[in-house]
Image: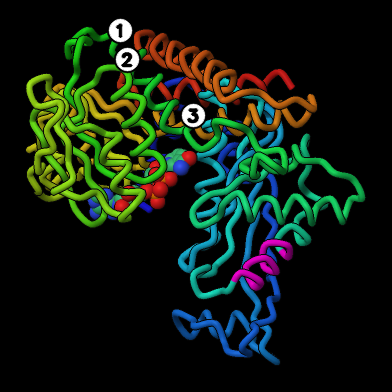
């Protein structure tokens, strides 16, 4: 993943700016611990799990219908608190990627100002090829492999790509069986019935809204009255930030998902789009509703166009909330937005970043923009440790405070070092961890 290499370069540059001693930087570039293991899963049909290449086939011996899946947990740094980071299930997962993602979590939690370090886990598996029972066996197997190295004050895993609340519930339950006590604070992203938090589903989108709102307070251009927004991606993150923006008077003129894109120059009624998406699974052009005063009652077909064109609309705020590397040196020159809020991880390439800076387009980096999810996780952990259950309103109020503070820290660092939002975010994140190490 290009953005992970970019993270390493940014940390290097930030270390130079901070004149960080070489030994401290070297220490921060190595994970503190790597757990590497295989998880056996009995296949119900006795078949082999389709493998991508011969190396895979060799790595995972198949015997009597049992398949072994390669898995990792990387604990990058714990200077500021327990390791924190998701567990992903993906056929392309590999150790280098998990190491880089674990390090990214160290910087994200530090920037967010929460008492966590960074970690990440993965299983090299295509979960769509497993049935429900096999998925549960795999997930419980993962918890069994790492249980001695995790815990509320040691390492707190969470869901990530292709993992969800049900999987976290299985792992929490397995952990309880192994330790003999129910400790929900060992995992976050659980179902509400098993100690999950209200508001966790919307936390990342809400966090992005808070960061953008704070940014617009500091930068009254574009006009804060009714900014025009385009959003690429309408999944968890894209649809939730769309709701918060819509509720707060922003005009969303375009949205897209993997199947298509909608455009309505007067603004799209986001709740109608959500309704249709819930019923049909897609965002439908013919069911699009405009929201301008004159056309409020009217259902008008939105214009249909491509997700790539969406990126080039002349909007105030462009929000990539789907994929990595969608703004590159190829299209950066054609971007007309005034501000880009990176809700996806790594949507702007390093080359594109330079072109956008030359054009005067501000980029609010992923590490800050999408930190609402991990801040939400932190509040789930806090509730579990205190045996409390907060309302969604209370959780969002706390995320709001936490992220507004993180934004202020990044803004102060930006003006102190006269640098980009991205570099300022990394400088601030690195500084917090390095200072803790120096004083430890
Ligand atoms: P999701 O799977 O719920 O949604 C992804 C959306 O992107 C879907 O609507 C999909 O249709 C759309 N999409 C896919 N290809 C597209 C394309 N070519 N053009 C337009 N849309 C396309 O995923 P999510 O949880 O919303 O995550 C989105 C991004 O945010 C990812 O980069 C993820 O790593 C990042 N992120 C998510 C969270 C979280 O809490 N969910 C936290 C931090 C970062």
Labels 2 and 1 touching (C-beta < 8 A): yes
Which residue is pictured at 66% across the width and 38% down the height? 196
Q: Is mark 2 on a helix, strand or loop?
A: helix
Residue carrying label 3: 372
x, y percentage for residue 222?
A: 17, 14
Q: What element carries label 3?
A: helix
Q: In which image quadrant can residue 328 be found?
A: top left
Over which residues does the magenta segment extend?
A: 132-141
x, y percentage for residue 52?
A: 44, 79
Tag of residue 215? 2
**In the image, the residue with mark 1 has its CB under 8 Å from the nearest atom of ligand 1:** no
Q: In which image quadrant can residue 217 be found?
A: top left
Q: Which of marks 3 and 2 is nearer the N terminus?
A: 2
Q: Which of marks 1 and 3 is nearer the N terminus?
A: 1
Residue carrying label 1: 218
**In the image, the residue with mark 3 has its CB under 8 Å from the nearest atom of ligand 1:** yes
- Which is more toward the observer, 184 or 152? 184
- Residue 8 visible to the viewer: no
């Amino acid at each position: 993943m290009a953005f992970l290499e970019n993270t390493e370069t940014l940390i290097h540059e930030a270390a130079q700016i901070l004149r960080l001693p070489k030994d401290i930087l070297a220490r921060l570039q190595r994970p503190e611990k790597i757990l590497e293991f295989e998880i056996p899963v009995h296949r119900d049909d006795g078949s082999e799990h389709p493998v991508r290449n011969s190396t895979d086939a060799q790595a995972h011996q198949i015997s009597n219908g049992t398949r072994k899946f390669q898995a990792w947990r990387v604990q990058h740094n714990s200077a500021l608190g327990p390791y924190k980071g998701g567990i992903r299930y993906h056929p392309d997962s590999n150790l280098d990627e998990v190491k880089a993602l674990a390090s990214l979590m160290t910087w994200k939690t530090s920037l967010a100002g929460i008492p966590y370090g960074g970690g990440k886990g993965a299983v090299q598996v295509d979960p769509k090829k497993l049935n429900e029972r096999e998925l549960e066996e795999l997930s419980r197997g993962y918890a069994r492999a790492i249980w001695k190295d995790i815990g509320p004050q040691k390492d707190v895993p969470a869901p990530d790509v292709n993992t969800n609340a049900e999987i976290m519930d299985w792992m929490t339950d397995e952990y309880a069986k192994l330790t003999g006590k129910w400790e929900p604070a060992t995992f976050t992203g659980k179902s509400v019935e098993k100690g999950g938090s209200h508001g966790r589903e919307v936390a990342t989108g809400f966090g992005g809204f808070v960061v953008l709102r704070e940014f617009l307070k500091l930068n009254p251009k574009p006009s804060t009255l009714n900014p025009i927004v385009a959003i690429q991606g309408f999944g968890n993150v894209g649809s939730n930030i769309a709701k918060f923006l819509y509720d707060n008077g922003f005009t969303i003129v375009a949205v897209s998902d993997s199947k298509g894109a909608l455009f309505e120059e007067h603004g799209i009624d986001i709740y109608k789009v959500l309704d249709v998406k819930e019923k049909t699974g897609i965002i439908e052009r013919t069911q699009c509703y405009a929201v301008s005063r004159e056309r409020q009652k009217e259902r008008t077909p939105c214009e249909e166009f491509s997700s790539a064109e969406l990126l080039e609309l002349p909007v105030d705020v462009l929000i990539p909330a789907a994929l990595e590397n969608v703004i590159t040196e190829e299209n950066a020159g054609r971007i007309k937005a005034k501000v880009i809020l990176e809700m996806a991880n790594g949507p702007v390439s390093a080359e594109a970043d330079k072109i956008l800076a030359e054009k005067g387009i501000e980029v609010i980096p992923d590490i800050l923009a999408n930190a609402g999810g991990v801040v939400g996780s932190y509040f789930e952990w806090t509730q579990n440790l205190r045996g409390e259950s907060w309302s969604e309103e209370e959780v969002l109020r706390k995320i709001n405070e936490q992220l507004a503070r993180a934004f202020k820290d990044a803004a102060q660092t930006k003006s102190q070092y006269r640098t980009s939002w991205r570099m300022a975010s990394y400088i601030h994140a690195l500084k917090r961890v390095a200072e803790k190490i120096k004083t430890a």
